[in-house]
Image (spheres, helix red, strand yellow):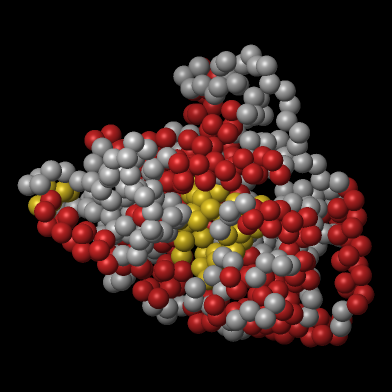
């Protein structure tokens, strides 16, 4: 539905006048003053699907003031080696201008295993930081006030016990847990769809997620217990429309989970956030982000009954595309990352991680991590893109691409719901996981793109074209085998010094609660306080709930 331009602009102006705004110079480099938003000429009509910044369906952004009010949070994803080493990197990032923390965990932690388990051999500290118990969290955040620092943790399978260890570390710092702010990924659907790091069958995982939603809503209202992730879906090879559709469908599934628990959608939906990939196709990514806000707002209002704007908002973190980085001519990755980051900003991201040039080869070195951080700061402080809300809004190309991606996503939603035995999105997601449908769709998309590369229809500079170079190999971060040996020694000493009887009681109480409908967060928190390890907590629940194997599909 269209409306006269004047009416919409007047509404926007009232919101803008009431919004808090940064004290900054909003002029071009040449000194030209720019308006905080632009639209069609007076007397024209504005399509309702586009609207104005700060109003439903939020295609042009959540806030009337855009980045004039609040800039995106620079949140660099980081973790390697042991907790002490990662703590030093966090302090470097914060000193250099980072505004929040994002924790990367190693593979044993992501799989709910202790560092001394046989399956952990050779993996400790290599793709992130090793966390075995709450004592590691103490070291990880030593000298960093968790009460004052928003903290994101990218982990899903064992997300709830790791979150409990984070809460224990905050308690030991003297923090008021009710004031903590941050985001826990917890998105188990995308694990079955793309990343493949689950612990249990789907339904026990959904039970844990429901418990976490209830607990945070009642006790830690500012903390976001779910970050619905499309990043790993895109990195696995999906198209932009598939990333958008699969991610939002997962989000609808979690809304249905909250409603099934009797929670008020207007209270729990603001605790859901999203995590998207910013790939190299500049305009497609901008359109994807704009479509995401529009679709989410409409579904939350029209399908799930959300009445408040905050419940209809889609807030999202973006990370530049790791899969776009190349080992060949890695300096080119700085350019790729800058373009992808700019697309995220022009699409209205709420927080952003920029990949380092050497991440395709190893965990980021300190100089590469600094360059990645500075990339965001150049965009934020030098380019002028924060002066105007949704500066590409109204572009014929961007609006057409936004509409097309949104329409493709709706077609995919229909396919997912068509698989559901009960008409819910959740039922369709679970059936799609069990049948291998999601995996097959992503594999087909990845294969089609690879064919285009091999036929020369698509190019990657430095790989398929312009392959001659004067550059050399960068120095990369290498994790010493001593990190694993030291972590295992520390874990052994920690087990020897703790109150084993208290650990056993806490684990028994947790398992007993798992056999009832009781919320599992409080007994799991008690186990973390007793220094039960991640492997012990997850192992006790594996014994109770069983494990899960993906069905073979050809």
Seen as rendered, the residue at the extreme front is 31
Q: Is residue 323 above or below residue 143?
A: above
Image position of 373 (left or right of 491): left
Image position of 404 (left or right of 152): left
Q: Is residue 216 above or below residue 309?
A: below
* Front-most of residues 387 and 81: 387
* Front-most of residues 40 and 430: 40
* Front-most of residues 108 and 433: 108
Image position of 192 (left or right of 383): right
- Residue 161 lies in what quarter of the image? bottom right
Give the residue drawn at x 80%, y 41%: 478
Q: Quadrant of the C terminus?
A: top right
Give the residue drawn at x 77%, y 60%: 83
Give the residue drawn at x 65%, y 70%: 145
* Front-most of residues 203 and 38: 38
Confirm whether residue 46 shows in the render.
yes
Image position of 427 (left or right of 189): left
Confirm whether residue 238 shows in the render.
no
Q: How many marks?
A: 0
Image location of residue 553, percent across then percent down: 59, 43
Give the residue drawn at x 92%, y 75%: 496
Image location of residue 30, percent across then percent down: 34, 36
Image location of residue 375, percent across then percent down: 54, 41
Image location of residue 66, percent across then percent down: 34, 54
């Amino acid at each position: 539905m269209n409306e006269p331009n004047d009416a919409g602009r007047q509404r926007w102006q009232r919101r803008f006048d009431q919004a808090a705004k940064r004290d900054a110079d909003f002029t071009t480099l040449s000194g030209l003053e720019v308006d905080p938003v632009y639209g069609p000429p007076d007397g024209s009509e504005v399509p309702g699907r586009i609207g104005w910044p700060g109003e439903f369906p939020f295609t042009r952004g959540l806030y009337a003031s855009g980045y004039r009010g609040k800039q995106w949070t620079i949140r660099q994803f980081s973790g390697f080696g042991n907790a002490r080493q990662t703590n030093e990197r966090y302090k470097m990032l914060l000193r250099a201008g980072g505004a929040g923390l994002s924790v990367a965990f190693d593979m044993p932690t992501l799989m709910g295993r202790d560092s001394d388990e046989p399956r952990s051999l050779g993996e400790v500290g290599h793709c992130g930081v090793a966390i075995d118990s709450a004592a590691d969290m103490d070291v990880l955040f030593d000298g960093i006030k968790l009460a004052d620092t928003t903290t994101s943790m990218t982990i899903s399978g064992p997300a709830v016990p790791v979150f409990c260890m984070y809460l224990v570390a905050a308690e030991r710092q003297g923090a008021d847990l009710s004031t903590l702010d941050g985001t826990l990924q917890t998105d188990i659907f995308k694990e079955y769809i793309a990343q493949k790091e689950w612990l249990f069958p789907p339904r026990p995982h959904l039970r844990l997620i429901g418990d976490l939603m209830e607990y945070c809503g009642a006790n830690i209202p500012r903390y976001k217990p779910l970050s619905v992730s499309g990043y790993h879906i895109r990195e696995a090879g999906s198209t932009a429309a598939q990333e958008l559709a699969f991610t939002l469908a997962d989000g609808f599934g979690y809304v249905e989970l909250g409603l099934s628990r009797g929670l008020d959608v207007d209270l729990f939906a603001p605790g859901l956030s999203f995590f998207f990939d910013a790939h190299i196709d500049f305009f497609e990514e901008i359109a994807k982000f704009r479509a995401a806000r529009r679709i989410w707002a409409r579904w939350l209002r029209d399908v799930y009954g959300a009445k408040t704007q905050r419940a209809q908002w889609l807030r999202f973190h973006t990370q530049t595309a790791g899969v776009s980085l190349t080992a060949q001519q890695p300096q080119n990755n700085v350019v790729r990352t800058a373009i992808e980051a700019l697309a995220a900003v022009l699409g209205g991201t709420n927080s952003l991680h920029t990949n380092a040039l050497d991440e395709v080869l190893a965990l980021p070195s300190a100089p590469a991590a600094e360059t990645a951080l500075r990339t965001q700061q150049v965009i934020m402080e030098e380019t002028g893109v924060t002066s105007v809300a949704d500066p590409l809004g109204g572009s014929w190309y961007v609006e057409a691409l936004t509409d097309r991606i949104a329409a493709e996503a709706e077609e995919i939603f229909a396919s997912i719901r068509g698989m559901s035995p009960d008409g819910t999105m959740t039922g369709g997601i679970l059936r799609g996981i069990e049948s291998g449908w999601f995996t097959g769709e992503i594999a087909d998309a990845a294969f089609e793109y690879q064919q285009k590369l091999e036929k020369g229809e698509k190019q990657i500079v430095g790989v398929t074209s312009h392959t001659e170079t004067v550059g050399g190999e960068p120095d990369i971060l290498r994790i010493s085998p001593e990190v694993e040996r030291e972590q295992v020694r520390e874990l052994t000493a920690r087990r020897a010094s703790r109150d084993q009887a208290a650990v056993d009681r806490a684990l028994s109480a947790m398992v007993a609660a798992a056999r009832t409908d009781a919320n599992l967060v409080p007994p799991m928190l008690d186990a973390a306080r007793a220094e039960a390890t991640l492997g012990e907590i997850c192992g006790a629940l594996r014994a109770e709930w069983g494990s899960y194997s993906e069905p073979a599909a050809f």
